[in-house]
Structure formats: structure tokens, C-alpha cells
Image: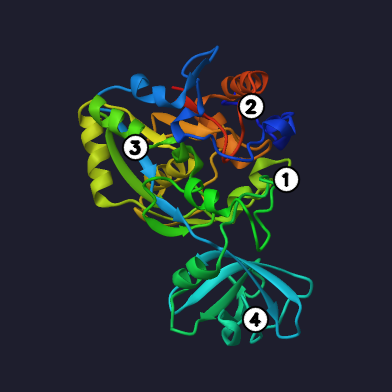
Amino acid sequence: MSSCTREFTLSDFDFDLPESLIAQHPTAVRSASRLLDGRSLPPTDRIFRELPDLLQPGDLLVFNDTKVIKARVFGEKASGGKIELLVERVLQNNEVVAHMRVSKKPLPGAKIHLCGGLKNGGFEATLLGRWPDENGPLFHLSFKGNQGESPYELLEQFGHLPLPPYIERQQNAEHDPDEKEDSERYQTVFAAHPGAVAAPTAALHFDETVLAALQAKGVERASVTLHVGAGTFQPVKTEKLADHTMHSEWYDIPLPTLAAMERCRQRGGRIIAVGTTTVRTLESWAKYGNISGDTSIFITPGFQYQVVDMLITNFHLPKSTLMMLVSAFAGYEHIMGMYQHAIAQHYRFFSYGDSMLLERRR
């Protein structure tokens, strides 16, 4: 039975990954990371800076230009109980939506003193209720600073970078000795629009040297914005894939990017998505027709890709929705073969890890 017609379950996307392969720090130089060229099997071991040699004049690279915000903030309830917020989304009128870690959840109307509260140079939050409805998993809050600062300004001043849960050093503590390095390296060189709580990690490998070489090669660049949410790390818990509830993320495709994709098609070039967030954005537009809005698109084997021809992506978590997305793109057996090769050759996995180049299975 082919991978297109068989019914996949969660167990199909599991694999044994040695903990030693989970990257805890970035490479010294962005483009010195490894690149597994998976356009054919067996794959070819390369260095990321070789990417321009693998592309053609007239190709179009599409990046996600979201910017990671310092979304993790610490404080206490009026009772003195410790509280930690992870801001998932900034709304209008100084309001935010956040995950909350606390021993006992406060009630609507409760005041939360963040970073010492207003009296001690910090700021306050008022709990408005749950989100997106009264039984929602997230919390709806209003922020108030001493100078009328926006939530973005307050988070930039008082917040901490929300590194993924599998980076085990003290990124979740209030004092992290590596925070300076992370604030630079867990951000792409072209990050422009604040709103993400996780980086579009495939784009972390690009530096000015590689970008200049791509331009010299005649490869065009364009951008979309998808604000990556913490839901990207949520495990799939249902064995039947159709029973999984996909998280929602906001995206926007500028008109110049739509024009660039049309020019690429006209000249016979290939559209190359940098990262799965770019894939989700472009394929959401193709499937539903919206150039901006929320998407909860869930891409699994059997999905009909309409836009993306090639994909640059990092290595993903076992049983993750991203394993399903890349399997739908390049073929399940192809992806599992690549992962076996990557583990055998000690590639570095996840956000600060290495990357691979994939071609869409026709």
C-alpha cells in the first residue's frame, strides 16, 4: 500500500532519538550548521553555506519574518503566590492572551504584580477571564505600566525569551547566564514583526554571507509573517490523527510576496519555503483563499500541496505535527530514511539544530 493511501496513526511518526542529539546551543556561525540534502536517497551530507549552489537562478525563497518577543514574565498574585505568564498573543487596548503557570488559578478581576508590580518599578496585569471563550485554555489579561507602555514595550523591558521546553538549561529561570546569546541567536537576521513566542528555526541558519550569495546567484527573496505560538510544541495525544485539535496561529501574506510568487511561476522558477511556518502560511492561502487571518491547518500525508516546491526545515520532534507535514511533503518512507541517516551521522536536532533540504513528492 502506498503512503498516500494508507491510514497513518500517531505511532507511525515515532522514532528513537538520543538525548545527546538535541542541540542546547547554536553553532558558532549560523551558516556553519549542517544541511542534509534530501532531494534524493541516500541523502547527501553538506554544510548550510552550500545552499546557494543547490538552487537555480529564478527560484524564489519565502521567509517568515516574524520576530520572537520576550514573552515569558514572572510575578506574583496579591496573596503572594508565584505566577508565570507566557504571552501567546498581543491584542488591542493593552490586552494579551497568555498561558499561566500558578499553583491556584486566580479569578477574573484579580490583580497580578509582574516584576515587582507598579510600586517596585514593574507593571500590573488584571485577569479579564479565559480565552477564546469562558472555558478556553488561555487567559485574557490587561497590562498596565507606569508610563502607559504597550504590552510589546513592557515585555521587551521585563520579559524573558521563551526558549523551547527541550532546551534544558535555565532558560525558564528569572536569571539565565545565556540570555544574551539567545536574544541574538534565537532570532533570524531579518526578523521584522514582533509577535512570535518561538522562532521560525529553519531561517536561523541564514546569515548575511549566505543571503549575499543567494542574491548573486539570482535567487529572489520574499517574506510572509506567521506569529509562531506555543502550540507548536504541543504533543499529539490521539492515536488517530483526525482526532487531534490543531492550534491556531495568525499569518499575513503581503501583496508584493503574492506578486513575487506569480513572477516565479511565470519564469518557471521554484517556490522554496524556509520552514514549516512558511509552508503553513502559503498552503493556508492556497486552500482557503485568505491572505491574512488565523490558520489551524493540519497537514498530514495525503494533503495536496499547491504552492511549495521545495522546503528547508530543521529536524522535528517524534510524533509531532511537523513530522506529519514533512512526510506529506516528501513522502513518509523518504522522511523516515532521512531521519535514520541523520541520527546515524549525529546531526543536531530541533530549534538550534541542523537542517535539511526537501523536494516535493510529485
Q: What type is the residue that disc 3 sits on?
A: Glu
- Which is more foreground, mark 2 or mark 1? 1
Say the numbered circle drawn on residue 208.
3
Residue nearer the viewer, 215 or 229: 215
Marks 4 and 1, the one that precedes in the sequence: 4
Q: CA distance from mark 4 to mark 2?
A: 51 Å
- Reading the image, the residue beneath label 1 is 238
Whether pointer 3 and pointer 2 mark residues with C-beta atoms closer than 8 Å, the reply is: no
Residue 35 lies left or right of residue 57; in this view the side is right
Q: CA distance from mark 2 to mark 1?
A: 18 Å
Marks 3 and 2, the one that precedes in the sequence: 2
- Reading the image, the residue beneath label 2 is 6
Residue at 24 percent across and 32 percent down: it is 264
- Reading the image, the residue beneath label 4 is 112
Q: What type is the residue that disc 2 sits on?
A: Arg
Q: CA distance from mark 4 to mark 1?
A: 35 Å
Q: What type is the residue that disc 4 sits on?
A: Ile
- Where residue 274 sits: x, y (%)? 42, 37
Q: Residues within 10 Å of mark 1 (few under 14, many from 20)?
A: few
Q: What type is the residue that disc 1 sits on?
A: Thr
Local secondary structure at mark 4: strand
Residue 1 can be seen in this image: no
- Which is more foreground, mark 3 or mark 2? 3
- Where residue 47 sits: x, y (%)? 47, 22
Could you say which quadrant of the image residue 270 lies in?
A: top left
Residue at 64 percent across and 87 percent down: it is 109
Whether pointer 3 and pointer 4 mark residues with C-beta atoms closer than 8 Å, the reply is: no
